[in-house]
Amino acid sequence: WKSTLRMTVENRGLREATKVWALQALSDGTVISGDSLGHIQVWDGLSGTMTQTFDHNESGADVLCLAVSEDENKIFASGVDSSVRCIQRQCLPSAEAGDKSPQDVILEAAPIRNWISSTSHRKHSHDVKALAICHKNTSSSKPIELLVSGSVDTRICTYVTKDFKSSRPKIWYNWPTLSPISLSPQHRLLAVTRDDSIDLFQLSGPEMAAPAKNVTPESRDETRSLVKTISIQSPFNLNCSVISDDGKFLAASDAVSLYVFSLEVEGEDGKLEDVHPTKLSLPVDCRHPGTALKFDNRGRLFCATNNGLINILQINPVSKADSSDGDCYKVSLEHVFKEHVVDWSASSYHFPIVCLDLSTDGKWLAAGRFSSGKGAVNVFALATNEEGRYKHWWSLPEMDAPTTCIKFLGGGSVESSLAVGCSSNEFYIYNLDRRSLSHWSNDMGLPLLKSLPKELTSRSEPVARIVSNPVNPQRFILGSHGYFCTVDLDQPVPEQSSMFPPDHLRAKRLELLKEEDAMMYCLPLKKKSKSSASGNGSTNLAICLRYSEILFQDFIAENEMVIVEEPWMSILDELPDTLARRVYGT
């Protein structure tokens, strides 16, 4: 390689040289640069001269990233000033373009077509560090071109490049798809995973009585509920953890190792005073790091390892006299599931297992990945006694959308079935004995997306969890970060979902969007009635909007549910200061 040109940006008399943070090259030889003076500059790559320059912002804040549309007629820039600015190339007159191909038109007309600063959007609160162009597949033949921006405020925004000026950007909050929280119903303990520690919170105590029946929800003070912080010395962050239902064991994993603790709860008369953790020594074959963890009620730990295998660790109590290292428990490797990773040609096997679930009778184990291909969800038959055998039972068929969560339903006299939630907000019920869809899913038809209410399927937040009440095996809850929806398999599916509370701001916004869509496509507006406002009087698939920023949701007892929220303002308080901008009128 040989350098042919040297293009230098100005420094306005400053001693420190101007830094060029971003570069883009177009097919006609045009070069676009973004620098530390807040300039977006257009260069002729053939002669090395600057043809145009634009100020991204009035503060002179750095331009950190650039992106170019597929037709190379739009430039997008952003940086320390969080606005995303569009610079558009002038269009050619139709008579001048003639019957020439787009590439020929660009090559011939690019030198005489000027760039114009078009418009900007400010949906981020902090520095924008990345811009990218992607395409979204639609029902039509041509996909939609989108601009994606990522910021220090942990949010991602998408913009339609074709209608950048008129269309409204869409905000995607960075709530974790996998909850960092697990629950121990017996001791009413909540385990929260941090970067290098695990906090244990008590949900009830002498000063926090359990909520009474048929009353409004009660909140818990985080500072008063903290019982213990378990620190784990490791150079890597923790990626998953789980506490057993009986509160006796805690497991956590980082990128290099697995950690298992036995917990000794100190307290009396329902008053939990302290928790004493003891780290258990693990054999070498049990230390493989995991991507998902799950305890059962027989002292077994199911660990989905980072190489795709699923290890089953057995934890047995031993006397100190029989233990060489003084531990009260001995950990051994009981079984390894390998059958589901034999065919590495399947695309789903390259995704790590991110969720595990056990049936209430202990006969089934399900493992899920964030994928839609065959093998995204696998079901295993477990040994329920000493004579039982471990067996790979079934790989679920390919789905229309990636899997986001799995949950076993049933229990007691009701046979176990597996519910699978997808990123499109649809869900399917599978019968394990027949290795097929349940009668309910078959009756609803495929794809299920067409049979569900639009109030559910049109929501931007994908289903993140499925929780079920032990009292009602045929009922469960689809949970996301901004809502949750009740599902009753014994009730008919309504045409539209009812909202609770009905006067919630987000419910009103949904009604406005419906009216805008009707006006845009010249559809007749439906008259509002009491029956339509309440979803035709049906409580099935009702959507609750009372809670937002939900990190965790599960039942701790019969008819008693725990919801953990992370307010957006608390996240903003942890972020660095933003650029000080002069606001009009101040």
Image (spheres, rainbow, N blue to C red):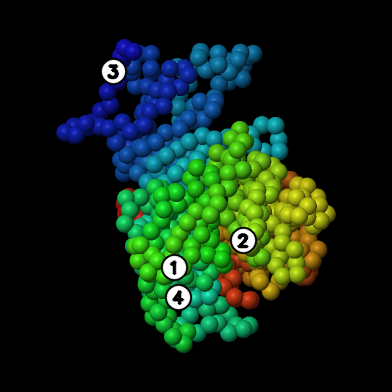
Q: Marks 4/3: CA distance? A: 65 Å
Q: Which residue bears the numbered disc 4? A: 202
Is the residue marked by circle 4 packed among few (<14), some (14-19), or many (20+) residues within 10 Å?
Answer: many
Quadrant that contains the C terminus: bottom left
| Residue 123 position (above or below residue 512) | above
Q: Are marks 1 and 4 in contact (CB under 8 Å)?
A: no
Left or right side of 60 for 185: right
Quarter assignment of residue 35: top left
Instruction: Identify the residue at horizontal 71%, vertical 38% (top origin).
Output: 139
Which element carries disc 1, helix, strand or loop? Answer: loop
Q: Earlier in the sequence, mark 3 or mark 1?
A: 3
Instruction: Identify the residue at horizontal 34%, vertical 59% (top origin).
Output: 232
Q: Earlier in the sequence, mark 4 or mark 2?
A: 4
> Residue type at mark 4?
Gln
Judged by depth in the image, the label closer to the viewer, 1 or 4, is 1
Q: Which residue bears the numbered disc 1? A: 318
Q: Are marks 4 and 3 in contact (CB under 8 Å)?
A: no
Q: Earlier in the sequence, mark 3 or mark 2?
A: 3
Instruction: Identify the residue at horizontal 29%, vertical 36% (top origin).
Output: 37
